[in-house]
Image: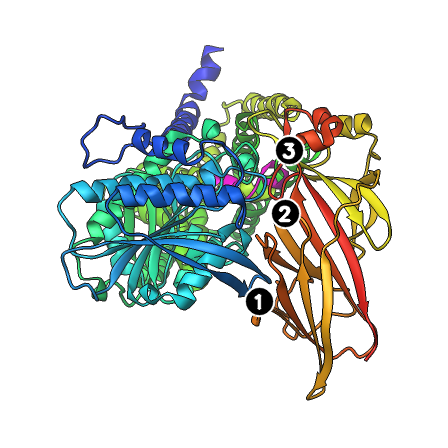
Amino acid sequence: MFGWFKDHFYLGLVLGVITAIVIAYSYFSTAPKVRASDIPQTEFSAERAFVELDEILAENHPHPVGSAANKIVRDRIWEKLIALGLEPELQVGLSCSAKFPGCAEVENIIAVKHGTGNPDAKAIMLATHYDSVPASAGAGDDISGVAATLEIIRILSTAPALTNDVVILITDGEETGLRGAMLFAQEHPLMQRIAVVINLEARGVTGLSNMFETGPDNQNLMAVFAKAVKRPAANSLAVEIYQRMPNDTDYSIYKEAGANGLNFAFAGGVSLYHSVRDSPAHLDQRSLQHHGDNAYEMINALGNIDLENLNADGNSTYFDLFTKKLIVWPSAINVPLAAGFLLLLSFFVYRLSRFSGIAATTATISLLGLLVLPVLAGWLLSYPLGIWVHTHPLDHPYPWPGRIVLLTASILCAMLIGKISSKWLSAKSLLLGAYWLISLLALVLSLTISGGTYLFLVPVILFAIGLVIDLIIRSKQFVFAIHLGLLGATYMAIYHFFALELVAGFSMSYVKMVPLVLLSLALAPIFAKHWEKPEVQWRAMFGAMVVIILSVGIIASLMPGFTTNRPRGQNLVFIENASTGKAEWVSETSGGQDAKFLEEAGFPNSAEPYNLYGVFKTKRVFKPAEKRLLPAPKLTILSDETSNDMRIITAEISSQREVNILAIAFDADKKPVTVKINDQLAARYDTDGKRNSRLVPIHGPQGNTYTLTIMTRITDAFPITIIDSASLQPAEFFRLAKLRRNDSAPFSQGDRSISVIRTEVAAK
């Protein structure tokens, strides 16, 4: 037994270092400690900011755009700004856009903290939003941003005045499609002065305040960020990925208007995002602390510099080192660096390796295996970890068993390739081949996703430095190269393994394994060298790894996928169609249906074909309901004319009750060309845009009547469906609400009643 431990001591040490990096990264990926209210007035205190948040959300009620609750929140923010010595203004208007089809009645809050410089000079903007979705009080998303803003304004009011003006914009209607930001960017003269935006967002209730998006030509801005922010959590690959995703925040609008900026958000506890449990009680004040620190440090750093020269000709590549230091360099040098190191390693492979035909073939197969095998293992492990049982796609309440399984699987893949290749290939040759492949991947990224080049370039640079040291000291074992390369590869692998949890859950474990390919590549040569020794008994270590994967995998598959603090999203929706006379209850979920609830509530146990609103063919879990005779929305045709081969239908629409949404819907085969609401373009269907939804909502209508102008080429009967949606309180459906378990919670649009009516405009 002692001999076995002696033989494997070195491997145990290597795995111990990897474990230490995992633990260290997990520790440093938590937000900083909350600073108390009695700290100096020139420092950000989450405790002080949370008092503001708690007062703004005193009732802990949802406050969607246009609602009475939203006006209460608006007034409280307004009063706090006045108490801080500002003179806020209200920007009110109907904001429509075809980019996100629909409109919203928004009320933006705007103020300026004046600096000592030219009042017409470029300014900094601190931006956030105050509206919530209908299901949520929005403590995280985004009253945390409002509270941080108020605390920052308080600091600015007590500290020496900055040179540059700071514009405070607290938008309305962000949750409805960035409507408040659009109204400000399109109509307010202050937009022309904005040089840089600090935008505060949230996609959960805990975690680091990550800087996940910047504007173009950000070299100078990132240089300021690197010096100013004490706990940077940012990497340029995240920016590249975010730009390729369909997600948007208010900053998307400001960026389109020409403003550079930094977009901050915390995204832990995403199962509470847009949930009824996004409340003050669930908000992590450490995340609020990090949010405020980041924003204040940047405003303080930008406050006295010339903003006219902020934009540079080019972007930065960057990543944080345990959130302690931002490593940053110009992206312009990525291609030369990656190409240079590829040439350097190609030279070393040529000079230091002696490949026979069999060895070259083995090396190629081994390296390809290291690229494919971990991802394949992740695909297989997706089933026990996230597919066999219902789990939230991004927020497992007990993630560590699954993490251990995937990390162990990546190590096992390296063991297998190392053992197989050791029969025909020297460890030195596999080592050089592995880092040559990593350098090739760095070059590919530099040419395609430049901001992600660092992922492979950093391990290559460290390996090359170690290799040069080894050659100088004539180390035949390549000790420095192996271990420096391993440190760089391990850090990058673990960093991105954790980061991917924001976009891929255990049901997509094959995606989570992608960064761990880097770990496997760095480990395989170490295992190959170890297995070269004939006396080493490798089967026991293989068996131990398999046992860990199987046993911990079983534990992971048995862990509950939802808890009270990490709930499944479930809405109960009452839909009544005045045109057909039918009424139904629909169970609407994210994360899969709760089988026990369906059985007790009398729903079928699976989704069935369903004609939603009589317009959208889909599948839903539904059951018949007793009619409530909800007041149907009203549509009045005013005119039906032809002009320049275009049919123009003009109508008035309104809701007969207090609702969150009044919407128009069109049949799939009878879509119009454009839709205008109160003469504003709200949707268009003559383009190939992916967001051309056939549902065109008006958020926050609250009794208003709207003029609808439909332009179409359809001359036969033209159907128009009108829908309105109002929140339901548990007392209105007590039995069903009581059956919903604690590990489920309303989300997004929440529990609601929907009234539908269909009108057919006669053929022209």
Seen from the viewer's position, the closer of residues 177 and 317 is 177
In this rendering, the answer to whether 636 lies above or below 59 is below
Q: Which of marks 3 and 2 is nearer the N terminus?
A: 3
Kind of residue indicated by mark 3: Thr
Q: Which of marks 2 and 1 is nearer the N terminus?
A: 1
User: Residues in magenta?
Assistant: 496-509
Q: Which of marks 2 and 1 is in front?
A: 2
Q: Circle 2 is placed at which residue position? A: 658
The answer to if 408 sits in the magenta stretch is no
- Mark 1: few/some/many CA within 10 Å (<14, 14-19, 20+): many
Measured as percent of width and height from the top left, residue 293 is found at: 28, 39
Quadrant position of residue 45:
top left
Element class at badge 3: loop
Kind of residue indicated by mark 2: Glu
Asked if disc 3 and disc 2 are in contact, CB closer than 8 Å, the reply is no
Seen from the viewer's position, the closer of residues 382 and 601 is 601
Measured as percent of width and height from the top left, residue 114 is found at: 20, 55
Residue 190 falls left or right of residue 309: right
Q: Circle 3 is placed at which residue position? A: 391
Element class at badge 1: loop
Kind of residue indicated by mark 1: Ala
Residue 676 falls left or right of residue 448: right
- Mark 3: few/some/many CA within 10 Å (<14, 14-19, 20+): many
In this rendering, the answer to whether 536 lies above or below 131 is above
Quadrant position of residue 439:
bottom left
Q: In which quarter of the image is the C terminus?
A: bottom right
**Count of labels in the image:** 3
Q: Circle 1 is placed at which residue position? A: 98
Q: Distance between the residues labelled 2 and 1?
A: 25 Å
What residue do we see at 38% from left, 58% from top? Answer: 342
Residue 453 visible, this orientation: no
